[in-house]
Image (spheres, rainbow, N blue to C red):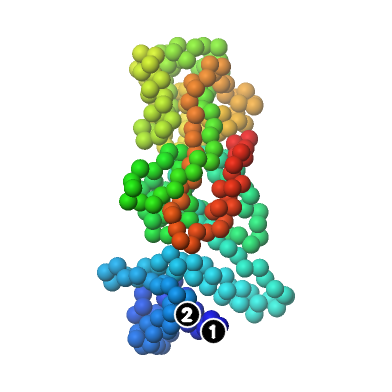
Amino acid sequence: MPLNYHHLRYFWAVAHEGNLTRTAQRLNLSQSALSVQIKQLEDRLGHALFERRGRQLHLTEAGRIALDHADAIFSTGQELVATLTGPVQNRKALRVGALATLSRNFQIGFLRPILSRLDVEVILRSGSPTELLEGLGSLNLDMVLMNRPPPDDSLTPYETHQIGQQDVSIVGTPDRIDPDSPIRELLLDQPFILPTTDSSVRTAFDAMASRLSVRPQIAAEVDDMAMMRLMVREDVGLALVAPIVVKDELSSGRLKEAKEHPLIKETFFAVTLRRRFPNPLVQDLLERSTGAAFLS
């Protein structure tokens, strides 16, 4: 039996409105009639599209997939009517969450294979680990990019994929850093601009300082790479940062890098949810990530 597009449009309207009563009023339908239309669509597709949580309607995983297709179908129809210039490609959506502190260079490098595709729309959101994992759990995100794996919780079906790694160095202005100085001497003599304590890089730095029996002076704790870059350029202190973040300053000589390496690496992970209907774009990206050089 072919799909009834009237049913699909009613579902599409409710999904975007998020409220059955308001949608029924806007469409000049009774609430019961609208419910029947959506139920018929669910019967045709063989899956529930909404679930109730209190008085709120929330999309199920099947509902999220149906909404993606409905968005593409009705968008294409509108473009056809507006332009009459021939067929228009349906655009697929990929919703990616990334930690607000995560390297922008890494994000662009990882997403580059699909950013130039005309049939794909990438929706990129930033936030805290809690916000992003909640978005993943509610199916508002297909994937979350982090620099540490999520908490190991057997009740949450996370799948964690290691997708990249980069070295971290100590950098500073030429007036502040002698590149030939040992790390222990730098830790003793200079203030440091560091990631916040919830960062795996910061954890590794603190462990290194402890091994060297040094308690470094902390000039600032920063959770944003752009701010860290600005502060080290302004000579606030030495920064613990991946060289890629300040590559222009290193190339121009505005900043120098310590020759002794702190042997700290930042590891990147893509976190997904075990889903019955995974977004195929996610798998495509994960397959392309194997051996890819994101950070050059």
Question: Which label belongs to residue 152?
Answer: none
> Is there any visible trace of residue 175 in the rendered image?
no
Residue placed most toward the observer, 23 or 5: 5
Q: Is residue 140 left or right of residue 233?
A: left
Q: Is residue 262 above or below residue 50?
A: above
Q: Earlier in the sequence, mark 1 or mark 2?
A: 1
Residue placed most toward the observer, 289 or 253: 289
Q: Which residue is mark 1?
A: 1
Q: Is residue 88 above or below residue 44?
A: above
> Tag 2: Cα neighbours inside 10 Å, few (<14), some, or many (≥20)?
some
Residue furthest to the right in view is 85
**Among the 4 quarters of the image, the one containing residue 292:** top right
Q: Measuring from the top left, give residue 68's x and y in whole percent.
A: 52, 67
Give the quadrant of the N terminus.
bottom right
Question: Which label belongs to residue 44?
Answer: 2
Q: Amino acid at mark 1?
A: Met
Q: Measuring from the top left, give residue 93's x and y in whole percent.
A: 55, 61
Residue placed most toward the observer, 223 or 242: 242
State the residue at coordinates (41%, 88%): 28
Residue placed most toward the observer, 18 or 175: 18
